[in-house]
Image: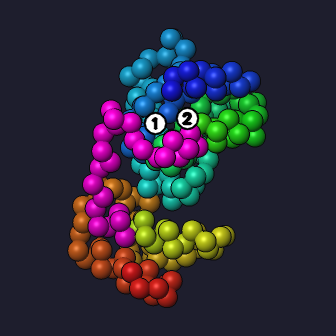
Amino acid sequence: MASALRKLNAVPGVIGTMLCDREGAIVADAFPPAFDRARLGKLASVLVGRTAVLEGVLGAGGTLDLRFGTARVVVHAGDGQRLVFLCHPAVNPSLLALSAADLLRRPARAGGRPSPSSPPPPPTGALYGLLQRIDEHLAGAGASRFKLRGRIAVQAGLALELVAPDSPDDPEQLAQLRAAATEVLGHPF
């Protein structure tokens, strides 16, 4: 995997690359030796660790592009993985997206099986699971997806972006979210 990331570093404008899991743990990285590995780990956990928030903004396979004065951080979301690039501000986003898509597709080509050293995915709470089912239902809603999700959040009185796999399952919140989604979408949850 590290060799594939080093190839991505050859894309003009890319400084370093890391592959993270859904929770923000670094699976592999290809950053120059001058970068502190502990800080890279913290960056990954802060930037990628809240997958529910990232997927709420990007969808399951989107891109986050953060621009700074002297750098650019680009995150490509894939099936259970996040590819994080540190780049020069003028990097070609189309070339980066093509390169990222190729790498993020590889596990799917291999059958989607986790490697023997991969830890099992964390258990999913009922609240998070319900939100995932709602998001799956909304996936085909196009531009109205965000409006519908916003209406559900307001009606349920719950910040959906803050619901994570390890969020506690409050029966009252679960009932409110289920009722709001059923009313807004006209589909029983």
Per the image, the residue denoted by label 2 is: 84
| Residue drawn 51% across the image and 74% down it | 137
106 magenta-colored = yes
User: Can you give x and y, in whole percent of width and height, for residue 122 in the image?
Assistant: 29, 49
Q: Which residue is drawn at 62% across and 47% down?
A: 63
Residue 79 on the magenta segment: no
Image-based side of 72 in relation to 183, left or right = right
User: Mark 2 belongs to which amino acid?
Assistant: Val
Indicate whether 163 appears above or below 70: below
Would you call the spot at circle 1 few (<14 residues within 10 Å), some (14-19), or many (20 or more)? Answer: many
Check disc 1 and give the amino acid type: Cys
Q: Where does the C terminus fall, quadrant-wise?
A: bottom left
Q: Looking at this view, is 186 or 100 the one in front?
A: 100
Mark 2 in CB contact with mark 1 (< 8 angstroms): yes
Disc 1 designates what residue?
20
Q: In terms of depth relative to the viewer, which is nearer, 35 or 101?
A: 101
Secondary element at tag 1: strand
Does residue 45 show up? Answer: no
Residue extent of the magenta highlight: 104-130
Going 45% across and 72% down the picture, which residue do you hit?
134
Measured along the vertical axis of the image, is residue 114 above or below residue 43? below
Q: Earlier in the sequence, mark 2 or mark 1?
A: 1
- Give 66 or 44, whichever is nearer the viewer: 44
